[in-house]
Image (tube, rainbow, N blue to C red):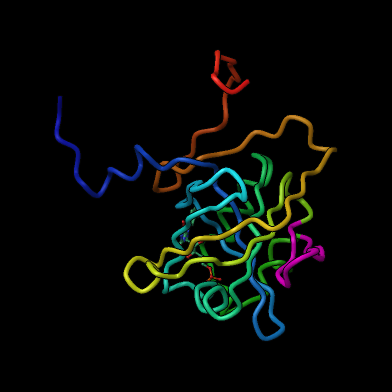
Protein backbone atom coordinates (compact mmCIF):
# COMPACT_ATOMS: atom_id res chain seq x y z
CA UNK A 1 0.00 0.00 0.00
CA UNK A 2 1.09 3.56 -0.66
CA UNK A 3 0.20 6.65 1.36
CA UNK A 4 -2.39 8.96 -0.17
CA UNK A 5 -2.33 12.70 0.58
CA UNK A 6 -5.28 13.63 2.78
CA UNK A 7 -6.16 16.27 0.20
CA UNK A 8 -7.08 13.44 -2.18
CA UNK A 9 -9.34 11.44 0.11
CA UNK A 10 -12.50 13.13 -1.10
CA UNK A 11 -11.84 11.86 -4.60
CA UNK A 12 -12.30 8.29 -3.37
CA UNK A 13 -15.54 8.85 -1.53
CA UNK A 14 -17.34 11.55 -3.40
CA UNK A 15 -20.61 9.73 -3.74
CA UNK A 16 -23.50 10.83 -5.92
CA UNK A 17 -23.70 12.38 -9.35
CA UNK A 18 -22.66 15.92 -10.13
CA UNK A 19 -25.80 18.04 -9.85
CA UNK A 20 -26.86 21.62 -10.48
CA UNK A 21 -28.24 23.73 -7.65
CA UNK A 22 -30.46 26.68 -8.52
CA UNK A 23 -31.36 29.57 -6.24
CA UNK A 24 -33.36 32.77 -6.68
CA UNK A 25 -32.60 35.90 -4.70
CA UNK A 26 -33.76 39.48 -5.23
CA UNK A 27 -35.21 38.57 -8.62
CA UNK A 28 -32.02 36.91 -9.82
CA UNK A 29 -31.98 33.18 -10.56
CA UNK A 30 -28.59 31.52 -10.37
CA UNK A 31 -27.10 28.08 -10.86
CA UNK A 32 -23.99 26.25 -9.61
CA UNK A 33 -22.46 22.79 -9.97
CA UNK A 34 -22.31 20.61 -6.87
CA UNK A 35 -20.93 17.20 -6.02
CA UNK A 36 -20.61 17.32 -2.23
CA UNK A 37 -24.03 16.01 -1.27
CA UNK A 38 -25.44 12.92 0.40
CA UNK A 39 -28.80 11.37 1.29
CA UNK A 40 -29.74 11.60 4.98
CA UNK A 41 -33.28 10.19 5.08
CA UNK A 42 -35.56 8.15 2.79
CA UNK A 43 -38.90 9.91 3.31
CA UNK A 44 -39.38 12.73 3.41
CA UNK A 45 -36.14 12.73 1.44
CA UNK A 46 -33.45 14.72 3.24
CA UNK A 47 -30.19 15.69 1.53
CA UNK A 48 -27.12 17.21 3.15
CA UNK A 49 -24.94 19.40 0.96
CA UNK A 50 -21.95 21.69 1.23
CA UNK A 51 -22.27 25.04 -0.52
CA UNK A 52 -19.11 27.07 -0.04
CA UNK A 53 -19.59 30.51 1.47
CA UNK A 54 -17.32 31.82 -1.28
CA UNK A 55 -20.07 31.04 -3.81
CA UNK A 56 -22.71 33.56 -4.79
CA UNK A 57 -25.28 30.77 -4.32
CA UNK A 58 -24.44 30.53 -0.61
CA UNK A 59 -25.97 33.89 0.34
CA UNK A 60 -29.09 33.17 -1.71
CA UNK A 61 -29.56 29.75 -0.16
CA UNK A 62 -29.01 31.04 3.36
CA UNK A 63 -31.37 33.99 2.90
CA UNK A 64 -34.22 32.33 1.00
CA UNK A 65 -33.87 28.76 2.35
CA UNK A 66 -34.97 27.39 -1.03
CA UNK A 67 -33.27 25.70 -3.95
CA UNK A 68 -33.71 23.17 -6.73
CA UNK A 69 -31.34 20.25 -7.22
CA UNK A 70 -31.33 19.41 -10.91
CA UNK A 71 -29.65 16.20 -12.07
CA UNK A 72 -27.99 16.38 -15.48
CA UNK A 73 -27.20 13.47 -17.79
CA UNK A 74 -23.79 13.01 -19.38
CA UNK A 75 -24.64 15.08 -22.48
CA UNK A 76 -24.80 18.19 -20.28
CA UNK A 77 -21.38 17.60 -18.67
CA UNK A 78 -19.50 20.36 -20.59
CA UNK A 79 -22.17 22.92 -19.65
CA UNK A 80 -22.22 21.75 -16.02
CA UNK A 81 -18.45 22.15 -15.74
CA UNK A 82 -18.77 25.61 -17.31
CA UNK A 83 -21.45 26.53 -14.76
CA UNK A 84 -19.15 25.31 -11.99
CA UNK A 85 -16.24 27.45 -13.11
CA UNK A 86 -17.77 30.91 -13.09
CA UNK A 87 -19.98 32.97 -10.80
CA UNK A 88 -23.50 34.31 -11.02
CA UNK A 89 -22.12 37.48 -9.44
CA UNK A 90 -20.88 38.46 -12.88
CA UNK A 91 -23.36 36.93 -15.31
CA UNK A 92 -26.67 35.22 -15.95
CA UNK A 93 -25.48 31.62 -16.17
CA UNK A 94 -28.79 30.35 -17.59
CA UNK A 95 -28.27 32.62 -20.60
CA UNK A 96 -24.54 32.09 -20.85
CA UNK A 97 -24.86 28.28 -20.96
CA UNK A 98 -28.21 28.15 -22.77
CA UNK A 99 -29.97 26.30 -19.98
CA UNK A 100 -33.71 26.75 -19.69
CA UNK A 101 -35.21 27.85 -16.36
CA UNK A 102 -38.70 26.40 -15.82
CA UNK A 103 -41.11 27.38 -13.05
CA UNK A 104 -41.10 25.16 -9.98
CA UNK A 105 -44.23 24.27 -8.06
CA UNK A 106 -43.33 24.74 -4.41
CA UNK A 107 -40.24 27.02 -4.46
CA UNK A 108 -39.10 30.20 -6.21
CA UNK A 109 -35.83 28.91 -7.76
CA UNK A 110 -36.31 27.45 -11.24
CA UNK A 111 -36.06 23.88 -12.47
CA UNK A 112 -33.53 23.22 -15.22
CA UNK A 113 -35.58 21.95 -18.15
CA UNK A 114 -32.69 20.02 -19.75
CA UNK A 115 -32.07 17.89 -16.62
CA UNK A 116 -33.62 14.42 -16.30
CA UNK A 117 -34.65 15.01 -12.67
CA UNK A 118 -35.42 18.12 -10.63
CA UNK A 119 -35.92 18.24 -6.85
CA UNK A 120 -37.60 21.24 -5.25
CA UNK A 121 -36.08 21.70 -1.80
CA UNK A 122 -36.31 23.81 1.33
CA UNK A 123 -33.57 24.17 3.93
CA UNK A 124 -34.62 22.39 7.13
CA UNK A 125 -31.42 22.54 9.17
CA UNK A 126 -28.69 25.18 9.30
CA UNK A 127 -26.89 24.12 12.48
CA UNK A 128 -23.71 23.21 10.60
CA UNK A 129 -23.73 26.10 8.14
CA UNK A 130 -21.42 28.36 10.12
CA UNK A 131 -18.93 25.61 10.81
CA UNK A 132 -19.02 23.55 7.59
CA UNK A 133 -21.23 25.39 5.05
CA UNK A 134 -23.46 22.33 5.36
CA UNK A 135 -27.18 22.66 4.67
CA UNK A 136 -29.80 19.96 5.19
CA UNK A 137 -32.53 20.10 2.56
CA UNK A 138 -35.94 18.49 2.44
CA UNK A 139 -37.27 17.55 -0.99
CA UNK A 140 -40.81 18.94 -1.29
CA UNK A 141 -41.53 17.93 -4.88
CA UNK A 142 -39.66 15.76 -7.37
CA UNK A 143 -39.86 15.68 -11.17
CA UNK A 144 -38.40 13.42 -13.82
CA UNK A 145 -38.34 13.80 -17.59
CA UNK A 146 -39.99 10.72 -19.16
CA UNK A 147 -38.30 11.54 -22.47
CA UNK A 148 -34.87 10.79 -20.97
CA UNK A 149 -35.21 7.03 -20.55
CA UNK A 150 -31.71 5.86 -19.59
CA UNK A 151 -29.78 8.91 -18.43
CA UNK A 152 -26.15 8.38 -17.50
CA UNK A 153 -24.92 10.44 -14.59
CA UNK A 154 -21.32 11.58 -14.15
CA UNK A 155 -19.32 11.68 -10.93
CA UNK A 156 -16.50 14.01 -9.99
CA UNK A 157 -13.06 12.60 -9.18
CA UNK A 158 -11.38 16.00 -8.85
CA UNK A 159 -9.42 18.22 -11.21
CA UNK A 160 -11.70 17.84 -14.20
CA UNK A 161 -11.85 14.02 -14.06
CA UNK A 162 -15.22 12.29 -14.03
CA UNK A 163 -16.50 8.73 -13.90
CA UNK A 164 -19.52 7.99 -16.04
CA UNK A 165 -22.34 5.79 -14.82
CA UNK A 166 -21.66 2.29 -16.05
CA UNK A 167 -23.41 -1.03 -16.34
CA UNK A 168 -26.43 -1.56 -14.06
CA UNK A 169 -26.44 -4.80 -12.05
CA UNK A 170 -29.22 -6.14 -9.86
CA UNK A 171 -28.44 -7.99 -6.61
CA UNK A 172 -30.73 -9.40 -3.97
CA UNK A 173 -31.94 -6.83 -1.48
CA UNK A 174 -33.95 -7.22 1.72
CA UNK A 175 -36.44 -4.60 0.59
CA UNK A 176 -37.34 -5.59 -2.97
C1 LIG B 1 -17.84 19.25 -10.87
C2 LIG B 1 -17.96 20.37 -9.88
C3 LIG B 1 -18.42 20.10 -8.60
C4 LIG B 1 -18.56 21.14 -7.65
N1 LIG B 1 -19.03 20.85 -6.41
C5 LIG B 1 -19.21 21.85 -5.51
C6 LIG B 1 -19.79 21.58 -4.24
O1 LIG B 1 -20.15 20.46 -3.90
N2 LIG B 1 -19.93 22.63 -3.38
C7 LIG B 1 -19.53 23.91 -3.70
O2 LIG B 1 -19.69 24.83 -2.88
N3 LIG B 1 -19.01 24.19 -4.92
C8 LIG B 1 -18.85 23.20 -5.83
N4 LIG B 1 -18.33 23.47 -7.06
C9 LIG B 1 -17.92 24.82 -7.36
C10 LIG B 1 -19.10 25.74 -7.72
O3 LIG B 1 -19.95 25.14 -8.66
C11 LIG B 1 -18.50 27.03 -8.29
O4 LIG B 1 -17.77 27.68 -7.29
C12 LIG B 1 -19.56 27.94 -8.88
O5 LIG B 1 -18.91 28.73 -9.79
C13 LIG B 1 -20.28 28.80 -7.86
O6 LIG B 1 -21.15 29.64 -8.55
P1 LIG B 1 -21.85 30.92 -7.90
O7 LIG B 1 -20.77 31.86 -7.42
O8 LIG B 1 -22.66 31.50 -9.01
O9 LIG B 1 -22.68 30.42 -6.75
C14 LIG B 1 -18.19 22.46 -8.00
C15 LIG B 1 -17.71 22.73 -9.30
C16 LIG B 1 -17.61 21.71 -10.22
C17 LIG B 1 -17.09 22.01 -11.61
Is 113 drawn above or below residue 151 in the view shown? below
Residue at image position (76%, 66%) is 106
Left or right of residue 35, residue 76 in this image: right
Is 34 drawn above or below residue 12 in the view shown? below
Is 40 drawn above or below residue 108 in the view shown? above
Quadrant location, the C terminus: top right
Query: Does the stretch in magenta take in 105?
Result: yes
From the top left corner, tell me how far across and down residue 119 is, in percent. 68, 54
Residue at image position (77%, 49%) is 143
From the top left corner, tell me how far across and down residue 140 is, in percent. 69, 58
Highlighted magenta segment, given as a residue range: 100-112
From the top left corner, tell me how far across and down residue 161 is, in percent. 45, 41
Residue at image position (73%, 51%) is 142
Q: Quadrant of residue 91?
A: bottom right
Quadrant location, the N terminus: top left
Counting every numbered tag in the picture gives 0
Which secondary structure dominates the residues rendered in magenta?
Answer: loop
Q: Which of 161 and 129 is in front in this view?
A: 129
Left or right of residue 54, residue 174 in this image: right
Amino acid sequence: MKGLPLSKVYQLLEPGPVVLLTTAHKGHANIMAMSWHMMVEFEPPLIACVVSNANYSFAALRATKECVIAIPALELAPKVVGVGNCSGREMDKFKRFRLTPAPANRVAPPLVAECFANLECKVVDTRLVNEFNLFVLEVLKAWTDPAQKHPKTFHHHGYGRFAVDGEMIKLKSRKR
